[in-house]
Image (spheres, grey):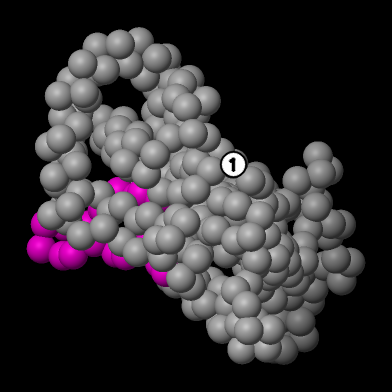
Amino acid sequence: MQKCIKNGPLAQLLNAKKAYPVRPEPWKGPPTVSYRKMFRNQYDTDVTTWSPAGRLFQVEYAMEAVKQGSAAIGLRSKTHIVLGCVNKANSELSSHQKKIFKVDDHIGVAIAGLTADGRVLSRYMRNECINYSFTYESPLPVGRLVVQLADKAQVCTQRSWKRPYGVGLLVAGLDESGAHLYYNCPSGNYFEYQAFAIGSRSQAAKTYLERKFENFTDASRDDLVKDALMAIRETLQGETLKSSVCTIAVVGVGEPFHILDQGTVQQMIDAFEIVGEQEGPAAEPDAAAGQEASAEPEQGAAAGEGVAPMDI
């Protein structure tokens, strides 16, 4: 009888109450630090969430994707605009992604960043030019197209179900007001430049352009192409400049937007090779200073290139 009382259902219930008290334990606070480390930043999970410092981290990450893309440069004079980019392939067995797109006879773009986003935006710009030309029977002004593109990019920074475009665009165009070169940022901002460079290792090209830009206004078409090739060479960091590693496009007065073929580009490189060798020693100190100034960002970009799951 005593064994039944000790091992019976009543005894088991009494033992369960001792093991599991009725009163719940008080809350011990938020999750541990190890759980929090899963997130890099508590304000970067949504593009519409502001940080206390007034920053939108998702937009900044999109701008970082532009820095990790292959370099693109643009420069303009009174009559011509030249775009150039570096051709980067994922492997020796694959071809490079196209980085320069024709929008209309008087407008073209060069991109740095996520190629897929750049392809979609260039198609949007092409449709806008076609619609404007059909309605008004005149070419779309460059500044108006750039504003429309910036508005489209800005919408993606204010909608929780969208993400910012991870691509920067250099828009080159010629209209009644003259030659224009704009840079459209993933944040929705846009700026007009005399010359500019974006993408990986673009700081070296910026240093060269800043040293030469005063001569661009009155420069000829061939001089602009030469300076574009020299700026691209600065981004290669020791790699030989060949027509297979770069693409050049030109638009100007009496010259519709078109991409130069590799044979023409190689002839220009061979013609400017002697000039490049003469300017090389003089350019080394400034290039070294520019590389030191951008050492930290470029290291981050190089690290990002190895792990990015998408072609940029």
Q: Specify the farthest residue to the front.
A: 254
Relative side of 71 to 26, left or right: left
- Relative to 213, say whether 46 is above or below: below
Relative side of 218 to 281, left or right: right
Whole-percent x, y for residue 103 in the image? 48, 71
| Residue at (31, 52) in percent of width and height | 248
Whole-percent x, y for residue 24 in the image? 85, 66
Q: Quadrant of residue 263?
A: bottom left
Residue highlighted by disc 1: 193
Camera-nearest residue between 232 and 27: 232
Q: Residue 87 in magenta?
A: yes
| Residue at (60, 52) in percent of width and height | 178
User: The C terminus lies in which quarter of the figure?
Assistant: bottom left
| Residue at (36, 49) in percent of width and height | 84
Whole-percent x, y for residue 224 in the image? 38, 39
Question: Which region is colored magenta?
Answer: 83-102
Total marks drawn?
1
Q: Circle 1: is it few (<14), some (14-19), or many (20+) Cα within 10 Å?
A: some
Amino acid under label 1?
A: Tyr
Whole-percent x, y for residue 82 in the image? 41, 49
Camera-nearest residue between 157 and 123: 123
| Residue at (64, 60) in percent of width and height | 176
Q: Quadrant of residue 52?
A: top right
The secondary structure making up most of the magenta span is loop
Relative side of 2 to 110, left or right: right
Camera-nearest residue between 33 and 146: 146
